[in-house]
Amino acid sequence: MKNIVAFKNVTKSFNGFAIKNMNLTIKKGEITGFIGANGAGKSTTIKLIMNLLQPDTGEVTVFGQQYAHHEKAIKERIGFVYDNNIFYKDLHIKDIRRIVAPAYQSWDNELFNQYIKLFELPTNKAVQTFSKGMQMKVSLAMALSHKAEFILMDEPTAGLDPVFRRELLDILQEIVSDGERSIFFSTHITSDLERIADRVAFIQKGELLFTDTKANIMQNYALVKGSTSLLNDEVNTCFISIRQQGNHFEALTGHTEKVAQLLGHQVQLEKVSLEDIIFYAKGGKALYV
Ligand SMILES: Nc1ncnc2c1ncn2[C@@H]1O[C@H](COP(=O)(O)OP(=O)(O)OP(=O)(O)O)[C@@H](O)[C@H]1O
């Protein structure tokens, strides 16, 4: 499957925080959800994808091209969607159309009008009077009207009411249904991922812990419970995190099959939700009591 975005050993350091040796790929035709705790590095990663930040080392390619030589061509094909559309706040939708349209070669006015209607956005009010969800829809309508092939969203569903959130998620699913467009969005809400993501990327303290299809994650990840006497170096390599209490342990594994081979019936294997994975993975590789 074709990569829309490929990070190759990307590092980016700030004082006290670093994206470490990141090898993120985003696949064509899929919705990839990007999850991680506050401050894990989601926005920084999105800025690297958008070339708003440049890597200290490593390489970012988008549509197989590098920003250094193809910035305009790449940006033409990306729709960066965010609610805080500061440039356009005082404007009405028709003014936005007038200003934004000339910036894109492939802008389609007819399509823009269709989305404004579909999203039920008022055309007679300044965008700053719109709710957060409506502003998100304006941004999405703009992205779709210049026929962006890749929609990139930083926490699109944060602060939306459940009905609006579901509506937005349905729209996103519809967007990728032809297999030609791709979506990458960050979120804190695991149910968003459970609902629409094909693939999930999980970042923790600047490190990409995994990127995998939801189906694989559900199949390969499990909570393992058993006696601490079973733990040894070989067994421990199967675990992402281990919690011990007395002579019992609970561990998150991404290698259910291997654990079953090594420990068989001596341990209990329980299915996990994405929320469980994020909770248990929080301890990283550390072994703690
Ligand atoms: N320009 C910058 N200069 C210095 N530090 C920065 C800069 N941008 C981000 N950081 C730091 O990098 C870390 C990661 O921030 P980032 O915004 O990427 O996290 P996030 O996962 O998007 O968090 P949240 O979910 O809270 O939005 C934070 O500790 C932040 O303070």
Image (cartoon, rainbow, N blue to C red):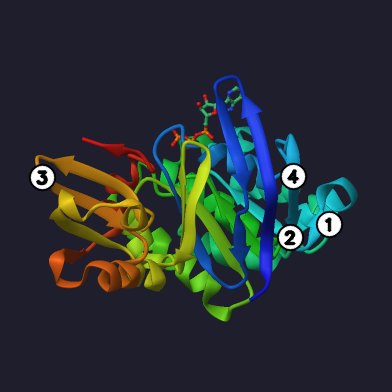
Q: Are marks 4 and 2 in contact (CB under 8 Å)?
A: no
Crowding near the residue tagged with mark 1, few <14, some 14–19, many ≥20 C-alpha atoms within 10 Å: few
Residue 154 visible somewhere in the drawing: yes
Mark sitting earlier along the chain (4/2): 4
CB under 8 Å between callouts 1 and 2?
yes
- Percent position (x, y) of residue 142? 63, 55
Q: Are marks 1 and 3 in contact (CB under 8 Å)?
A: no
Q: Quadrant of the N terminus?
A: bottom right
- Tell me the kind of residue under disc 3: Asn
Name the spot of residue 243 as percent of width and height, x first.
22, 43
User: Helix, strand or loop at disc 3?
Assistant: loop
Please report whichever mark, 1 or 4, sits nearer to the chain's N-terminal start: 4
Q: Earlier in the sequence, mark 3 or mark 2?
A: 2
Q: Earlier in the sequence, mark 4 or mark 3?
A: 4
Q: Which residue is mark 1?
A: 73
Q: Which residue is mark 3?
A: 247
Residue under the image location 73 percent in, 48 percent down: 100
Label 2 element class: loop
Which amino acid, by three-letter code, is at mark 2?
Arg
Q: Which residue is mark 2?
A: 77
Comparing 242 with 181, the one in front is: 242
User: Are the residues tagged 4 and 3 within 8 Å (C-beta)?
Assistant: no
Q: CA distance from mark 1 to mark 4?
A: 21 Å
